[in-house]
Image: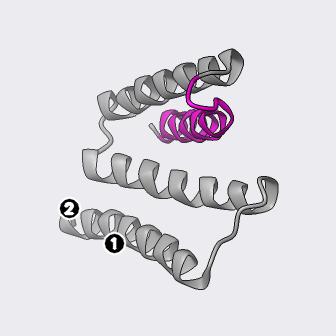
Amino acid sequence: MWGWLALAIGAEVTGTVALRFSQGFSRLVPSMITVVGYGLAFWSLSQALGRGMSLGVAYGTWAAAGVALVALIGVFFLGESLTWVQLGGVGLVIAGVLALELGGATSHA
């Protein structure tokens, strides 16, 4: 399950970064990478869900990891800025996913 989710996250991040370079879908290669990336992301996410991963944990992890990775890629490779407030927001998203995961683990005990 987690391997499928990791693939979904990687594909979504790849598609999002390519979207940045597609210039409104006017550049063919980045546009194609975006479409294939998002298609693979949703397919891989569906594979994780189909193998029993809970929807809240899967989608939360996918979204939080995607937000964090895209923000870091923007800062380190695309010359974008990240304020302390934005960094705190990313931290809150990650904390929310951890709460989902930990809350789900204790409710089954």
Question: Where is residue 64 drawn, in percent x and y?
Answer: 46, 58
Amino acid type of disc 1?
Answer: Ala
For disc 2, the neighbor class at 10 Å (few under 14, some 14 to 19, many from 20) is: few
Give the overall secondary structure of the magenta segment.
helix
Q: What residue is disc 1 on? A: 99
> Residue 102: within the magenta?
no
Specify the label residue 108 is tagged with: 2
Question: Where is residue 4 drawn, in percent x and y?
Answer: 50, 33
Number of the front mark, 2 or 1: 1
Q: Which residues are magenta?
A: 2-25
> Residue 4: within the magenta?
yes
Instruction: Specify which label sits upstream in the sequence, 2 or 1.
Output: 1
Q: Quadrant of the N terminus?
A: top left
At a point 65% along the width and 72% down the height, the residue shown is: 82
Q: Quadrant of the C terminus?
A: bottom left
The answer to whether 46 is drawn above or below residue 103 in the figure is above
Residue 28, quarter of picture: top right
